[in-house]
Amino acid sequence: MKKLFLFLIIAAVSFNCLKSQDVLTAADSALRTTYYWHSKDMYEHLPDIDNEIIFLGNSITDFGEWHELLGNSKCLNRGISGDVTDGVLLRLDAITRLKPAKIFILIGVNDLSHGKSPDYIIANYEKIIQRIKCETPETKIYVQSVLPVALKFEIKRTDNAKTAWIMEVNEKLKELAAKEEVQYIDLFSLLCDEENHMRKECSIDGLHLTYEGYRIWVNAIKPYIE
């Protein structure tokens, strides 16, 4: 009996350690910045206002003044600068607990910068979509394409440049959205130049958007907001 009791204790400790390791692995992928953890904590405790429209993503989402841009106080910003798909999965409970009316997702460019493959990103996107469907089935999901970047962000990954990776991710996101029967929104083609890089007037640093960039984005999604 004592041996059985000892075995159960060891098994429970091992399970908890594995769970903790999984969380730490995801947290490492989310960069574990103070800003990430502060934002995650804040989002977990802010009140539910009913029928929220959530904007979920990284700094590109984070820097958008959504309720002002869209003239809708129910548009809530749940972007975190530096976030990745693993980071979104780690904090998704704070989103789904609200049972929002709509979720607009844009995530992935930081994953590429950290060496993650398009397939890795798509696998995480699938987990994100399936969890939303399971945890808040009435919520409408909108998958937005990864945005273009300036030429200076062309970081080589094997034999491809970053733009090629982004375009591959977007093609696979479109396929995933069709498979999961959720709306795909192509923002890439609205913000890129003839060489598939970020249009100069849409960004100062080649990654984050100017007001003009957000204006174009907002005009593209307004039909899905109203």
Image (cartoon, helix red, strand yellow):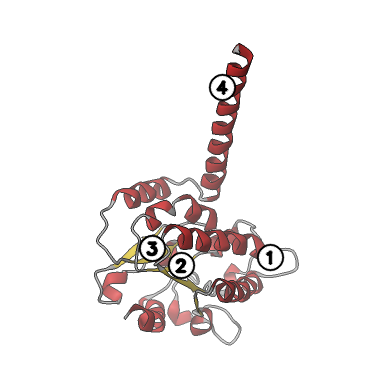
SS for tag 3?
helix
The residue tagged 2 is: 105
Quarter residue 71 falls in: bottom left
Q: Vertical placement of 43 versus 183: above or below?
A: above
> Marks 1 and 4, how far apart in space?
48 Å
Callout in the foreground (3, 2):
2
Name the residue beneath numbered marker 4: 9
Q: Position of residue 30 (x, y in %)?
A: 51, 50
Q: Left or right of 87: which side holds 169?
A: right
Which residue is pictured at 48% across the width and 80% down the height?
Answer: 200
Q: Amino acid at mark 1?
A: Lys
- The C terminus - image quarter: bottom left
Real-space Cα distance between discs 1 and 3? 26 Å
Q: Is residue 157 left or right of residue 79?
A: right
Q: Which mark is residue 62?
A: 3
**Which of pointers 1 and 2 indicates the residue nearer the eye?**
2
> Helix, strand, or loop for circle 4?
helix
Give the residue at mark 1. Answer: 156
Mark 4 vs 2, N-terminal side = 4
